[in-house]
Image (cartoon, rainbow, N blue to C red):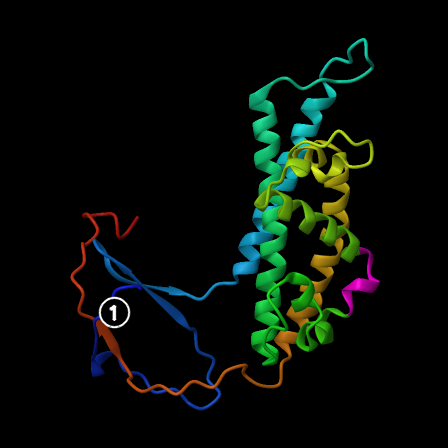
Amino acid sequence: MGRRHRLTSDQRLAHSHAAGTTIELVQLAGHTRFGTIAYTWPKHWAYHYDAATEAFNDLGKLHEELVRLPVGPDDMRTVSDIELLGRIYDAGVRLVVGVVLTVQHLCEEIERWTKTGPSGSTIEDRLAGPGVTDVVGTLKTQPGYAALHEIIERRDAVEHPREDNVYNGDDTGWDRVPLAWFISDRSLKAFETYQTWITESIEIWEEKKANWPQSPTTLEVGVRGVRSTHQFKKPARGEAES
């Protein structure tokens, strides 16, 4: 467990707020050297969305490196560059993990605002929940679902490696291997289809959230104006202004 925050009331920092005032929630974190750090509650799904998009762009560039490899007498390109394979694997893992985390955190935000709570822990469960379906519709009837499901399966294979998803010589089972899937154009096509769905869903949600009739949470503030009593290291001269 984290160390208890040492906070004390300081009326000089207290401010009154009228009912309905928009407030900004902050999360506290303890740092041994820097004391208590408060940060604004961000949209976590946006970080993961950007990370997945960056990974997709990186993977696309790596595919351009693949096409420059010579075709051998067997009419195949053979990739024996372990460093190149490592970069492809890294980009592919970042892509599938980023996609899964984007959807999970977007569902969490929708569930919180609609006060419906999660319908389960898996993406499939959460997307089928009443709050999420009211916002983004029934995903299973949309092209994005098949693409998302394909991406989730590769993420699961990365997280739970087995003999048949690390190497698979079956003509129809090669795509169970995440690295083989990353190397194929299936990975890029799946992300493009998913991206169309997720961006449209985000636009719908952001519009609905902007016009939401009431605040998603009512806060009862027990103490107004708090100050940390943890010791902290001050910034070096000039660092605070830079």
Q: Which residue is found at the position 77% from the left and 64% from the top?
A: 139
Residue occupying the point 76% across, 51% down: 147
Residue 146 falls left or right of residue 50? right
Q: Which residue is mark 1?
A: 5
Magenta residue check for 141 = yes
**Could you tell me the amino acid type at mark 1?**
His
Name the foreground residue: 218 vs 180.
180
53 up-or-down from 116: above or below: above
Residue lying at 64% horizontally and 44% vertically, measured from the top left: 157
Identify which residue, 150 or 114, lies in the foreground.
150
Q: Dividing the picture into quarters, in which one does residue 19 lie? A: bottom left
In the image, the segment drawn in magenta is 138-143
Q: Spot the residue most to the bottom.
A: 19
Task: Indicate the position of residue 193 as horizontal and vertical percent values.
Answer: 77, 50
Is residue 178 in view from this perspective? no
Residue 230: % across, % down: 18, 65
**Residue 74 in picture, x, y percent from top left:** 81, 12
Is residue 202 rendered to the left or right of residue 234?
A: right
The spot of residue 169 in percent (x, y) is: 75, 29
Q: Is residue 61 above or below residue 155?
A: above
